[in-house]
Image (cartoon, grey):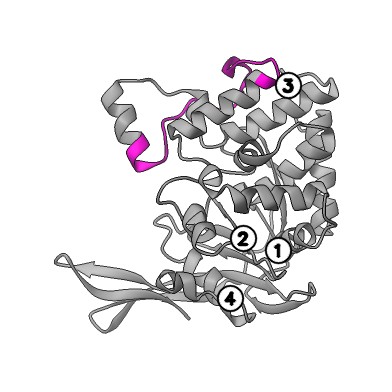
Amino acid sequence: MTRTPLPEYVPLAEVTRSGMRESVHYGAVVGLSADGRIAHARGPVHQPMFPRSSAKPFQAVAMLRAGAPLSGPSLAIAAGSHGGEPLHEERARLILAEAGLTPDALRCPPEIPGGSEARREFVRSGREPERLLMNCSGKHAGMLAACVARGWTTEDYLDPGHPLQVLVRETTEDLCGEEVAHTAVDGCGAPQLAVSLAGLARGLWRMRTAPEGSPERAVLAAMSAHPEYVSGTGRVDTDLMTRMPGLVSKIGADGVLVLSAPSGEAVAVKISDGDAAERARTLVALDALRSLGVDVSPVRDRLRVDVYGGGAPVGEVRPL
């Protein structure tokens, strides 16, 4: 086990109830200006962390660099964490079919839909968990499409030594401007690469400022044009990108969120407690983006979260 010092996380959001502070969310947040400089930083933004699914845009760039024929919704879902709705299931199946594969080729674990309505329909239908419904099946389908395009083996595509995963690592280091600090196994079974929070934001900034027609720009364009494939109905990424055209938002497990503004600014957040209720990372990220001069008024309601008591709002979660 790799031993690292405990991060010196700082208070980023507070929870108030009936006029008194009830709890505090600690973490780290970094914001890059349009020219790529660190213009906003709180907490240990240079220590290694796991981006989790916030790193999917980097993985999608690697897929394109390998020659995967992905575009539009197919590219968006390859960089996304979908909710298992019918459109997501159908798109992941289509990516596989176009590569001459079936869902049996997927190596992500069987799951049930993450989206609330899709989950209710799943229960009503009496279906069993399926790999195609796992939130990372779009990414896995894209990885398999890349392997087929390049003539690489598909059975072991999740092995860290597989040519595709070596390319993902090289792409991540290229975009983030730093070496991967540690390799782990993500929830979906794919390699998870540790970089700093500053490196994570830098990677999104480099994608945004890459030349027109590049794989980097193609991934961000697909995500912002098809937000429903990146996440799903009523979910954070889809909501933010729908209401702020051109924005790219990608949430990651255990309290991570990255935002890339069309004007070039980039923000990355890590909430240390994992933010299981997803009540802190979004408002902290938007507050950081606002501090960089980006107009976040279309989603101003996301800058606070109500705290309820007796069925009515009695407090709030707000950035510090």
Residue lying at 56% horizontally and 45% vertically, measured from the top left: 230
| Rendered location of residue 45, percent (x, y) | 68, 69
- Picture residue at 77% right of the left edge, 57% below the top: 207
Query: Is residue 129 covered in magenta?
Result: no
Tags 1 and 2 touching, CB below 8 Å: yes
Q: Is residue 111 magenta?
A: yes
- Report which residue position mark 4 lands on: 288
Residue drawn at x 43%, y 58% is: 278
User: Looking at the picture, which amino acid does disc 4 mark?
Assistant: Ala
Q: Secondary structure at mark 3?
A: loop
Q: Position of residue 218 (x, y in %)?
A: 74, 48
Q: Residue at x 61, y 71 (%)?
A: 29
Residue 158 seen from this side: no
Is tag 1's residue or tag 4's residue first in the polypeptide sequence?
A: 1
- Single out the residue that lies furthest toward the bottom: 19
The earlier-in-sequence mark between 1 and 3 is 3
**Which residue in the protein does label 2 denote?**
258
Is 37 above or below relative to 165? below
